[in-house]
Image (spheres, rainbow, N blue to C red):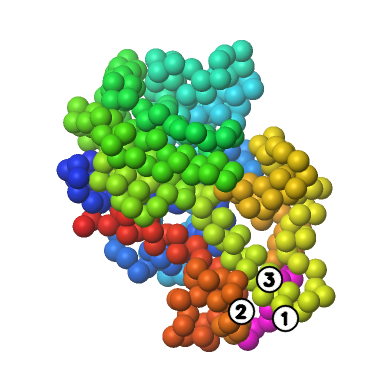
Amino acid sequence: MSDFLSGLSLIPLGQGGGITSVCSAHPWVIEAALRHGLTHDGPVLIEATCNQVNQFGGYTGMTPADFRAFVEAIAGEVGFPVSRLILGGDHLGPNPWRGQPAEDAMRHACDLVAAYVRAGFTKIHLDASMGCQGESEAVGDTLAASRAAELALAAEGASAKAGQSTKPLYVIGTEVPTPGGALEALDHVVPTSADAARLTYQAHAEAFQRLDLGDAFSRVIGLVVQPGVEFGDAAVLHFNPEAAAELSTALESMKGVTFEAHSTDYQTEAALTALVRNGFRILKVGPWLTFAMREALYGLDAIASELMPTRTSLKQEMEGLMVDEPGFWQRYYDGDATTLRIKRHFSLSDRIRYYWPHARAQHAVDALFQDLGTSPLPMPLVGQYLSRIAHRFQTDPKALQPKLLVISAIQEVLGVYARACADT
């Protein structure tokens, strides 16, 4: 499967061929991705971020080894062969500890990368672009590259010590869209210039060489740059191939490297296809998948309320939880009371996704499924409240079961990416 990633850079510009990077720790998203993968040849790439999964547990409570076991257990349940599974680590670097002095933050970051490699993650995004205590918000290319090389040294050491036959593949790059969406109103985003991309690549090449990591640098397969895409609470900036045409030419001087595009959520299929054909052959998606899951759950919630008008809705329960515990959204949303309420549930940044693992949320979802029962749901109600996926069940109304509908909603998004990444 590593050969698949390495081979992406060999595809000429203008042709199809790419891979979707599923960035989520929700079990239903992972299940949907693996079930979708069963219908296609090739690998499924699932990635965890440094805040989500780290040596201290992250906000999921999982270490890298835990996350691998978690994903492989789901693969076993759905019958997806682990030989076709690629695990990646996203934004691995000092970000979780950026409030600490750089020396301490980098020590933790090196331990983090080593933990991912020991756990068998083979795609490693080295991201040391953020400043630490007393530094600017973002550091320059030279310092970021130097720190990325330190992280690579830790990764190579962990791989060698573990006796791994498959060595890590690396993604580098510092021009990364805001994780989870923009915090400000969107107007336009300027794509990375070709010169800036080349300078980033060269700075990393030199930093790796200084640490005698030439072999590791030969396994750099991706460069993260800004193609000019972004999303905020209620707006999406779509890919403009003409604006990024000059950037794509930078790949000609980077042997074995493709571009990796972050924040591609909510792009049209045409835009995603254009991204792939312009050299962005790794497309990351995360919030759109849990957004689609939330849409399906709220659609099921509306169906349940039609069948049982006096029930307490899932939406009411989630509102109570988010108001009681605002830590995951309060810093990111602004506006009056009505605007905040709408953003809590419907923002494209989908910060409600952080609440689904909460015991109160899980209890509310369980109660919803109990209210819906085990009989197939009425097709007219599914058509009314889940119209995006109702067409999938017209010939098999007996399959109108709550969880199947949620999985189908997630797969509807994955299908957009699969078609965009198709080698056609």
Residue at (58% x, 38% y) in the render: 51
Q: Earlier in the sequence, mark 2 or mark 3?
A: 3
- Callouts 2 and 1 close, C-beta under 8 Å: yes
Residue at (33% x, 21% y) in the render: 196
Cα separation between marks 3 and 1: 9 Å
Residue at (74% x, 57% y) in the render: 318
What residue is disc 2 on?
Answer: 381
Cα separation between marks 2 and 3: 9 Å
Q: Which label number is shown at residue 307?
A: 1
Q: Amino acid at mark 3?
A: Ala
Cα separation between marks 2 and 1: 10 Å
**Residue 61, percent from left and from top:** 64, 46
Q: Earlier in the sequence, mark 2 or mark 1?
A: 1
What residue is disc 3 on?
Answer: 302
In this picture, which residue range is highlighted in magenta? 366-375
Task: Name the quarter where the C terminus is drawn.
Answer: bottom left
Q: Amino acid at mark 1?
A: Leu
Say above or below: 311 vs 197: below
